[in-house]
Amino acid sequence: MPDQSLLEDLDDDREFNVEFVGNFGRFVSFGSYPVDYFLTSLSMKQAYSYLHFARDIQMEDINFDLLMQRDIDEARVENEIMPYLKQDSGATSTRPLFFPPLLAAVVPVEGGRINSLYGSKSIQEVKPGFSGVSWEKHFQVYGKVTDKSDGLNLAPEIPGAPKIKAKQAVLALRTADVNDGGVMLVVIDGQHRLRALKRLMDENSQNIKDLILPVCIMYPPNSHSGVQDPDTTPSIPRVFRNLFVDVNSTMKEVGGHFNILLSDKNVGDIACRVFCDEVLKSYGKEGLALIEWNTRGKKDAYNVTKKYTSSSIGILKRGLEDNFKKDSYVYRLLKITAGSQDLFPEGADDDEYYPKIKWDKFSYAQSNSVKKRVNDHLVPFLLRLYFESVPFEKMKKVFLDEIKALKNQSQKGGHEGLNAQAVLSTILEYKPLENKAAFKSRMLDFEDAVEERRSELGLDVLRYALFQRAVFQALEKFIELGISFSVSPEKSFEGFLTLFDWIFENNASVFNFDQPYMQYTAFLQRSIRTREDTKRSFSDVILANLLREEVRGEISQLMCPDSTRLELDSSLRDEGFRAAGDLLGRYREERKSLFKKNFDMDYSLEKNERENLKLLEMEQKAAERQVKDGKKEEHTIEKKFDQKVSEYVEEYYVEAKVAFRKSLNIDGDLLEQDDETNDDLDDGAEGGED
């Protein structure tokens, strides 16, 4: 409760229904956007009533532009924080416990949803001798007026603003639980601690009745409706999104997807958030459920972890950043020109409007325009790829069919209906699945049904993160080619999708793990090789399909219907040969490397073959040691082991090349002709790898 010495003589009838006493401060550095803070302490009863989680708001509709950190790891609360607070009774009296201050944001809320700005800001005399700053209908900070030099100005940007005594002040709130259109204190750092404390209050409040919780309450004082230019004023959700990312960016295993969605630091992060918003608008909750956007673990955030989803925003972020960060791509993809007045207005301050836009460098004043351009020019590509391309549309249909079956079952009532409804709530509403065997069993049935049907359609490869990133790598080749022929990114993208769709309509087996050329380059037996070269191998297989004349002709006609079409067709053919050569070269090198390591366990070889190889290996290593010791010259030793390995690998290489030729439906002499001029296609490619 507020200190009575500060509040004496104040009327009981106030606009604001909650008040805290504490210390006021401001954080601003080198012209940064100011953030004010208020350090105070709350009893557990106050904390329970006034401190909220971000998931307490925006429950009906998801708005990614207003998103705040909503992720709570209940397992961490249960297994780490609760045991810390509930110490063994024998040691409790001698073991000190402490939590650092919670960070809480003052968030304006109306109708259960976040507002972008506070009410207009003004200087207010609260009572004779008390003055401060008020944000209309939201909150107020005030204190005793003083003329002393050490007085604190609560609003230095307002001429004539009074100073208050020392740093002690009162924070008065018009809370949303009492007044619709008021504010909520939303914890943006420390929500797991708060969750544990609230649970203890529910279980046995007597055990924490004496606990007084330190809290730092934050707000951006200049984000209010009275500003001259709302378009260039950071919104309240944006300020707190950025602060959350900054606070958590150096911590281990914070919510990986939320760190992407809450960030405005680069084009990729903005694209992920806008993409999710547009998916929700265009394809509803079912469409959004196909994209993983709220995965907790940092590592899992960059993979596809749920059996029923198609992709993840972590994959999307990496696919974009790996391939489109170059300035020339940013300008073309977002249609930026030197004369773009929304980004480079005449006479603008270079500190406010950067003269050069980069992937991860643009000012706040430019960010709204960057976001609009991302929405207009980049996100349509992504929606087309993930929801309308042949393979992803098939994945979507499988998912929607099984969702429809769940909905039908949920309407029948009884145990089956309850089970189906629980699964639907988890998939479409992101509510945790209750720990009931029947619910878990129904979820497994749903996942298995989706997985089985996708596998029957030959779509398994799509769910590998490395394959999806390879799609972006192959797309980048089309963008690059398009630039050399003055083709727009839209046309280049459509050209790529023509190839991508054609493969999955006519030749999806080209990616199968049992194809000889896919072994060692992308797979080992049935397991994918989790390394960057696997991504390159998938990309090369996609692009090698440009050797198919029928699809290449369709792409050339689409991208360049004029006289340059034949030149583009020739360039596409060259890219197909380059990709095929790179893949075969990578196969040869990987097959050789792994053969050397594992030949003694390779039971496809006869016992005497393995023994002979082992003897040759020992002799060669002995000779190499002599070279190292200076007893022999390098050129005098015979590397019979390496020669024998090459003989074996060459047989495998020929088998892989024949299988690749067959998958591409290429006449034998075409690749053989290229072999004659390019030394087995792959030698030139080996020297050109990244």
Image: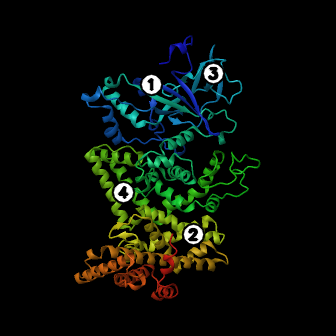
Amino acid carrying label 2: it is: Phe
Helix, strand or loop at mark 1 = strand
For disc 1, the marked residue is 42
Q: CA distance from mark 4 to mark 3?
A: 61 Å
User: Which residue appears at 51% of the width and 62% of the height?
Assistant: 385
Amino acid carrying label 3: it is: Gly
Asked if disc 2 and disc 3 are in contact, CB closer than 8 Å, the reply is: no
Image mark for residue 151: 3
Residue 190 location, quadrant:
top left
Of tags 1 and 3, the one toward the viewer is: 3
Q: CA distance from mark 2 to mark 3?
A: 63 Å
Amino acid carrying label 4: it is: Lys
Relative to 315, say whether 87 is above or below. above
Q: CA distance from mark 4 to mark 1?
A: 44 Å
Is 191 on the left-hand or right-hand side of 486? left
Q: CA distance from mark 2 to mark 4?
A: 31 Å
Q: Position of residue 582 (x, y in %)?
A: 48, 76
Say whether residue 624 is visible.
yes
Q: Earlier in the sequence, mark 1 or mark 3?
A: 1
Image mark for residue 478: 2
Q: CA distance from mark 1 to mark 3?
A: 26 Å
Q: Earlier in the sequence, mark 2 or mark 4?
A: 4
Relative to 415, say whether 271 is above or below. below
Q: CA distance from mark 2 to mark 1?
A: 59 Å
